[in-house]
Image: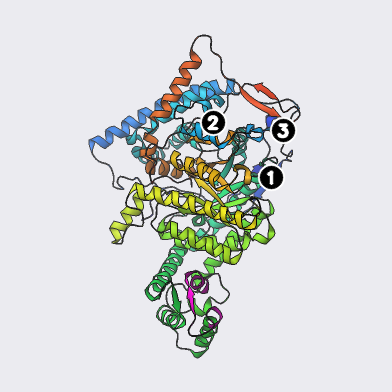
Amino acid sequence: MLHRAVPRATPTSLHCYIRWSPPHHSSFVTSSRSVLNTTTTRFNTTTRPSFTRSFVTNTSTKQQTSSNGRFKTISASIALTSAASMMYFYNSQREKNVVYAEANNAIQHPLSAFSTASPSSVLAELKDDDNRSFLQAKSTEDLFFASFIYKLCTFGWLVDAAPHLISLAETLGMEKVAFWVVRNTFFEYFCGGETAEECIRVMDKLLRSGIHSILDLSVEADENATQDAASQEQLCDFNMKMMKVAIETAAQGQDSGASNSTPLIATKVTALTPPEVLLKLNNAITTLEKAFHEHQVDGTVSVESLRKITDQVFPTSTEEDKNVRDALFNKFAPNEKASVDFIEYTKLFNANNSFRDVWYTHGDLLNKQDLEAYDRMMARLNEICQLAKDLNTGIMIDAEQTYFQEAIDNVAINLESKFNRREEERAPTVYNTYQMYTKASLNKVKIDVERAHRENFAFAAKLVRGAYMVSERKRATEMGYPSPIHDTLEDTHASYNGGVRFLLSKLHDHQETTGEPLTGSTAPIVFMVASHNRESIILTVQEMERQGVLPRSGVVHFGQLYGMQDQISYALGKNGYSIYKYLPYGLIQDVLPYLIRRAQENSSVLGGVTKERQLIFSEIKERLAPGNKTPATTVITEATASPVTNTVVDFEASAATEATAGVTEQTA
């Protein structure tokens, strides 16, 4: 069972309008970005998908009938009502007090643009748990708001009751009230807005602190969807158009002065094809991989073994098919004594090949309809990636559950091979995501680095720990196969840090061999350390210095979720490291599954915010002490390269902490 809640599509006669216009505050107008013309994009789809929602809790899918459950629901209702009242007061005051930092008639750059900080200085900040410098960019109102949100996150019963409360509100016709509460609490804190246009405000203020954004349209497919195939395909087409809007927004909102950081958006493959297609493709890939490991000797399989595998998996009785297969075997292994390794083996059976029919028209792994659906998915992804490449924007393909992941990895590596050509000397367009809490992840990274080297494309990756530990282990137990997740937290840490060390060592070797400095447009490897784990961040900074990888080279990036670990993010940003915030957005009803899943699967993380709350309390106490004034932020202007002080009271709320640094973390 897929443990997520997602939008579902049914045909309607609605039209969808997506409008882009620049923010009206002057910091955007006077920034180093080009002044944008207002444009309007209309998706004139006569059968525009409408969305419904379902919610799955991490405790039980059965109806709660106990008196304790009723008590929690009533308590949660009271809590949310109180939250609504507090948020009404908070927003009414906030509207009066918001002032944007601006330097009149000057071009603004992030503070990091003029930073000369050394690795030792950023390491000192990262190691200082009591460092409150990141709070200086936040208003007192925002600190109160952050403290309130953190407190709500500590109520596990509230997280568990949230899906039931929302369902109850919809039943009673009170969904507008529920959505208003969510929008002004968790949505406001963890999301960028309801449209890509609304995210510009958040992107702009993050950029002033040297922090870039990854736009993440929160749409994905539902394995349990009941729509017909045509409706599912229609929803996928609509999602593609929305992702193209995100690409255009990210490209137009980039900072022209930051050459080491590419505008990025996140993409879920499950949003671009019916899930059953990915499930069947995943099964085909794992079946073929299993056959390889059964027949391999010293990491290779012979031509004779290839014939046995194809006769078993893709049985055929025609001489014509056998002759075509023999010709392919001879191409990959020129004589009977030759053999192929795993990389060549997977290329031979790639569903993206022109000769795939000689395999997949036989057997029961994939049929003609599956291949046609696969082609439609690849056509959508190619259209998205081509637009991103044209606009110098990167596409980060998110990792998902392991029963989809082999198929997603296959899709990602095909796209990387096409759009990350090294001979073009440009920043990579496509990034794949590796969930390092899986037992196979580190070996997979090494194989794909070698594949990229052989085929001369840039290996672009995002390393995360993972976000589906509970559901993955539960599925493995129910279906009777070994859990794909590392057994211990220490094993996960070793896998993650091992991946970082391996990639940095490869960059060092390339630099030593070629004698050329590393840049994002010429390096064979570009990757993101997407982690909330302080020790992994510190290790990466230390290894970068040891391996001679410069912070501004554009080959190593860092990433955290918006609304979490700001202490780390701001320290990296102001010291010149490439840092991104994952910025999810979408309509409230579509982002609710993201928020609920994030709360459910990271409840231990969100509950461990004691340290951040203490820092915020200390900051508020100091500000409210007699004689103290609200701190000011510093904006550097290109004209004078000297500080211009302006009061800023509209920066995002402070970070949540990852107390356990556990395997439930994924910046995806």
Nearest the eye: 361 or 15: 361
Which residue shows up at 50% across the image and 59% down it?
232
Q: x, y (%) of residue 79?
A: 37, 28
Amino acid type at mark 3: Val
Q: Residues within 10 Å of mark 2 (few under 14, many from 20)?
A: many
Spatial CA distance of label 1 from label 2 is 28 Å
Q: x, y (%) of residue 549?
A: 58, 47
Amino acid type at mark 2: Glu
Nearest the eye: 348 or 595: 348
Front tag of 1 and 2? 2
Q: Residues within 10 Å of mark 1 (few under 14, many from 20)?
A: few
Callout 2 secondary element: loop
Determine which of the numbered discs, if any, sits on residue 40 in the image: 1
221 magenta-colored: no
Residue highlighted by disc 2: 652
Amino acid type at mark 1: Thr
Sequence-wise first label, 3 or 2 = 3
What is the span of residues highlighted in magenta in the rendered image? 330-352
Spatial CA distance of label 3 from label 2 is 21 Å
Residue highlighted by disc 3: 29
On-image quarter of the N terminus: bottom left
Q: x, y (%) of residue 173?
A: 42, 37
